[in-house]
Image (tube, grey):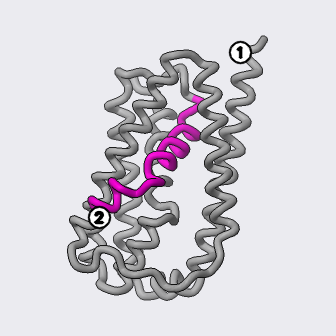
Amino acid sequence: MFDVSLLAATFFAGFLYTISPGPAFLALFALGAAKGRTPGAWFMTGHLVGDILWSVAALAAIVGVSQIGPTLFDILGIGCGLYLIYMGARAVMTRRDGKAAVIGADRPLVNGVIFGITNPKSYPVALATFGALVAPYGDHITWAATPGLIAAAFLGFVAADFILYVAIGLRPVRAFFARYGLWVTRIVGVVFIGFGLKSLLDGARGLASSAR
């Protein structure tokens, strides 16, 4: 039997990982604004390869740690929380830069695959996001549950990609993003800080319980 709460947390982690503003998010909206929905859809499809690769790696690391012992898993949760806070703080302090070049304008599918796999932030962000949201379910995370977790994360990716696909073709959204994209990034940074603090609290509680 799968823990429904754990699957829901994994789904939401995949959703948040995909829809949160970052290099791929910015590249997608720049491509959508310049070329429209179809190239954007191909870019997202290619990038999904990287999403799956790094989420599987992150979940494998989390499952492996959870099987070693609760103390190490709690320490991982604290580390993930600190990283989320760091990423959130950087997003909050983002400054306005010049307009970025349109990535993937010529070969959006190929460029999406390359971008998704080679983005140096993909694995640490995936590990931090999944680690922070599934940490409270450490006792239920096993190798047998991994296929279900991967499926839940994949559904989260697809749900987020569908919303992004619809959004990049809407003129008001494109105009809003062009004008307020900096503030969107900062608001998401605050969300990351909130999840980071929750992860720190959960990890601290787990360590306190183990020490008793």
Which residue corresponds to mark 1?
A: 210
Dot 1 lies on which element? helix
Q: Is residue 131 rendered magenta in the image?
A: yes
Please, what is the three-letter code of the amino acid marked with disc 2? Gly
Note whether 16 is above or below 10 in the view shown.
below
Left or right, 66 with reference to 188: left
| Residue 204 image offset from top left, x and y in percent | 74, 29
Within 10 angstroms of label 1, few (less than 14), some, or many (20 or more) residues?
Answer: few
SS for callout 2: helix
Say whether residue 12 is visible. Answer: no
Q: Earlier in the sequence, mark 2 or mark 1?
A: 2
Q: Residue at x 65, y 62 (%)?
A: 90
Q: Is residue 35 visible?
A: yes
How many callouts does the rendering have?
2
- Most common SS among magenta residues: helix
Q: CA distance from mark 2 to mark 1?
A: 44 Å
Image coordinates for residue 156, horizontal then vertical, percent:
40, 50
Q: Nearer the viewer, residue 107 or 184?
A: 107
Q: What is the magenta range?
A: 112-136
Q: Residues within 10 Å of mark 2 (few under 14, many from 20)?
A: many
Locate the C terminus and report the quarter of the image it occupies: top right
Residue plotted at (59% across, 31% down): 76
Decide which of 34, 117 is in the foreground and name it.
117
Kindly identify the residue that appears in the image at 46 percent across and 40 percent down. Answer: 10
Residue 168 placement: quadrant: bottom left
Q: Is residue 5 magenta?
A: no
Quarter of the image for residue 185 reads bottom right
Q: Is residue 67 above or below residue 171?
A: above
Which residue is denoted by mark 2 in the rendering? 112
Residue 84 percent location from the top left of the image: 62, 49
Q: Position of residue 154 (x, y in %)?
A: 34, 46
- Extreme-top residue of the structure: 212
